[in-house]
């Protein structure tokens, strides 16, 4: 079986068993969760870790700016 999907005709590609609407809702709640639910685990982990990193950096900068205003 050929695992490279670029050379597989579209009618032979495996169809996803995950409802796209549910995957979209999960990704809207927590980025990367819908991808992991749809079995694109690597992409989901990358998106989730990016989201967590950005939220952590934003929280750190907001706390730093807030503490600078009061001291």
Image (cartoon, rainbow, N blue to C red):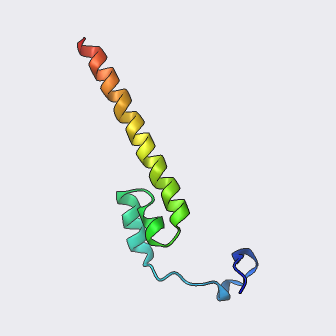
12 relative to 21, above or below = below
Q: Residue at x 47, y 83 (%)?
A: 17
Q: How many marks?
A: 0
Tell me the quadrant of the picture where the N terminus can be found.
Answer: bottom right
Tell me the quadrant of the picture where the C terminus can be found.
Answer: top left
Q: Position of residue 48 (x, y in %)?
A: 45, 54
Residue furthest top in the image: 71
Q: Position of residue 27 (x, y in %)?
A: 41, 61
Relative to the observer, which residue lies in front, 40 or 13? 40
Residue furthest right in the image: 7
Q: Position of residue 60 (x, y in %)?
A: 36, 31
68 relative to 34, above or below = above
Q: Residue at x 33, y 21 (%)?
A: 65
Q: Position of residue 66 (x, y in %)?
A: 28, 22
Q: Residue at x 73, y 74 (%)?
A: 6
Image quadrant where residue 18 sits: bottom left
39 relative to 71, above or below = below
Q: Residue at x 38, y 38 (%)?
A: 56
47 relative to 55, above or below = below
Q: Left of 43 or right of it: where is 20?
A: left
């Amino acid at each position: 079986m050929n695992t490279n999907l670029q050379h597989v005709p579209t009618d032979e590609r495996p169809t996803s068993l995950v409802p796209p609407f549910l995957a979209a809702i999960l990704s809207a709640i927590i980025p990367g969760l819908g991808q992991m639910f749809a079995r694109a685990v690597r992409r989901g982990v990358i998106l989730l870790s990016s989201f967590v990193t950005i939220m952590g950096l934003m929280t750190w900068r907001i706390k730093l700016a807030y503490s600078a205003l009061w001291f």
